[in-house]
Image (cartoon, rainbow, N blue to C red):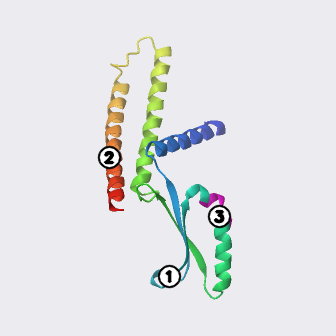
């Protein structure tokens, strides 16, 4: 596999993730806390809560604020902590989190459907005896894909319940 193919695969994967996030109505935000100290002796100095894109576009503002606070507290080590989350559900966007796993599962389903359609198209063109209904590999793949879709749909329902509970508690 050449470099171009691997880059194409990477771009396609990014598109699949973006599609999954759109379908799940994810609103990616970041909570930035500037502090000094550690553990229970940590002192919060400043707090930002903003959309992820805005955070990446205006990181210089946070660096400026950190520099200003470092001048105010020269004997302390001023640091930042970041918490990426979905504003709609309040769920963390960390890699091992439930929401990230759901996005990944949806992206994998999209990829699997694309591969299945490529397989069907290839066999229709190159195999005179190809029958979608009796092809063992395709039947097993479809069954597995349907199970994955059901699991994903259940996770989406749990996410929507979480969003509803969060809205009713506000």
Q: Which residue is mark 1?
A: 42
Locate residue 150 relative to residue 13 in the image: left or right: left
Q: 64 or 18, which is in the foreground?
A: 64
Q: What residue do we see at 35% from left, 49% from top?
A: 160
Q: Which residues are magenta?
A: 55-60
Q: What residue do we see at 68% from left, 83% from top?
A: 71
Q: Secondary structure at mark 1?
A: loop
Q: 158 or 165, which is in the foreground?
A: 165
First reached walking from the N terminus: tag 3 or tag 2? 3
First reached walking from the N terminus: tag 1 or tag 3? 1
Circles 1 and 3: CB atoms closer than 8 Å: no
Locate residue 140 relative to residue 51 in the image: left or right: left
Q: Is residue 165 above or below residue 64?
A: above
Q: Is residue 137 above or below residue 124?
A: below
Q: Which residue is mark 3?
A: 59
Q: Which residue is mark 2?
A: 157
């Amino acid at each position: 596999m050449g470099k171009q193919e691997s880059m194409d695969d990477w771009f396609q994967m990014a598109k699949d993730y973006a599609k999954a996030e759109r379908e799940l109505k994810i609103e990616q935000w970041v909570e930035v806390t500037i502090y000094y100290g550690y553990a229970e002796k940590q002192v919060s100095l400043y707090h930002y809560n903003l959309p992820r894109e805005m955070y990446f576009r205006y990181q210089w503002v946070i660096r400026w604020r950190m520099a200003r606070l470092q001048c105010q507290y020269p004997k302390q080590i001023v640091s930042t902590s970041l918490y990426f989350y979905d504003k709609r559900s309040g769920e963390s966007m960390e890699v091992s989190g439930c929401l990230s796993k759901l996005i990944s599962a949806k992206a994998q389903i999209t990829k699997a459907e694309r591969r299945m359609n490529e397989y069907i198209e290839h066999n229709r063109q190159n195999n005179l005896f190809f029958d979608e209904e009796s092809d063992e590999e395709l039947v097993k793949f479809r069954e597995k894909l349907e199970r994955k879709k059901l699991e994903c749909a259940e996770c989406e329902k749990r996410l929507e319940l979480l969003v509803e509970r969060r809205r009713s508690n506000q």
